């Protein structure tokens, strides 16, 4: 391919943060399930950190998506992964209040 497009660093970082967030949230839910539904404080802290990472990754994904002459794979993937993590955190919080 002869093109001037490049993979934006912010998009790659967004994807990495999205993978970390989704993986951390899945691990926290798995370990909470394994402990009989009793979440330990360290799982809650990991989920909070994952939520912060996912918001930062979502913002980075949008910022990188607005750049010109880029490949859109990593920004789009980062936005999707971080949005999944944010929705998952909101879902868990709402289910906790019900």
Image (cartoon, rainbow, N blue to C red):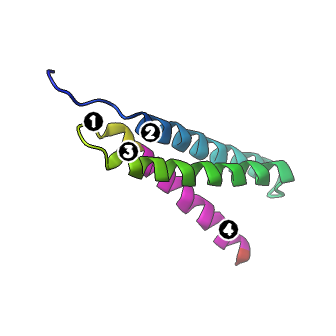
Q: Helix, strand, or loop for circle 4?
A: helix
Residue 40 visible in rendering = no
> Given contact means CB atoms under 8 Å apart, are the residues at marks 3 and 2 in contact?
yes
> Are the two marked residues, 2 and 1, in contact with CB atoms closer than 8 angstroms?
no
Q: Would you call the spot at circle 2 few (<14 residues within 10 Å), some (14-19), or many (20 or more)?
A: many
Seen in the image, is 41 located left or right of residue 3?
right
Give the Cα separation between the discs numbered 2 and 4.
29 Å
Q: Position of residue 37 (x, y in %)?
A: 79, 58
**In the rendered structure, which segment of residues is drawn in magenta?**
78-96
Mark 4 or mark 3: name the one nearer the start of the chain.
3
Which residue corresponds to mark 1?
A: 71
Which residue does the numbered mark 4 point to in the structure image? 93
In depth, the one of 73 and 29 nearer the eye is: 73
Q: In front: mark 4 or mark 3?
A: 3
Looking at the rendering, in which quadrant would you find the N terminus?
A: top left
Q: Which mark is residue 64?
A: 3
For label 2, the residue is 10
Q: CA distance from mark 3 to mark 2?
A: 5 Å
Q: CA distance from mark 2 to mark 1?
A: 12 Å
Measure the alpha-carbon separation of dots 4 and 3: 29 Å
Residue at the image point whose x is 48% and y is 56% from the top:
83
**In this picture, is 37 found above or below 18?**
below
Q: In this rendering, which labeled residue sits more in front, label 2 or label 1?
A: 2
Residue 48, relative to residue 5: is it above or below?
A: below
What predominant SS class does the magenta segment belong to? helix
Residue displayed at 29% across by 40% down:
72
Residue 11 horizontal side relative to residue 37, left or right: left
Q: Is residue 21 visible?
A: yes
């Amino acid at each position: 391919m002869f093109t001037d497009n490049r993979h934006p660093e912010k998009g790659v970082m967004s994807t990495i943060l999205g993978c970390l967030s989704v993986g951390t949230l899945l691990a926290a839910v798995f370990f909470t399930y394994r402990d009989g539904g009793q979440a330990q404080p360290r799982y809650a802290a990991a989920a909070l950190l994952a939520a912060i990472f996912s918001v930062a990754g979502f913002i980075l994904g949008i910022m990188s998506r607005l750049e010109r002459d880029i490949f859109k794979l990593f920004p789009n993937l980062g936005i999707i992964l971080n949005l999944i993590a944010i929705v998952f955190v909101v879902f868990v919080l709402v289910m906790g209040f019900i």
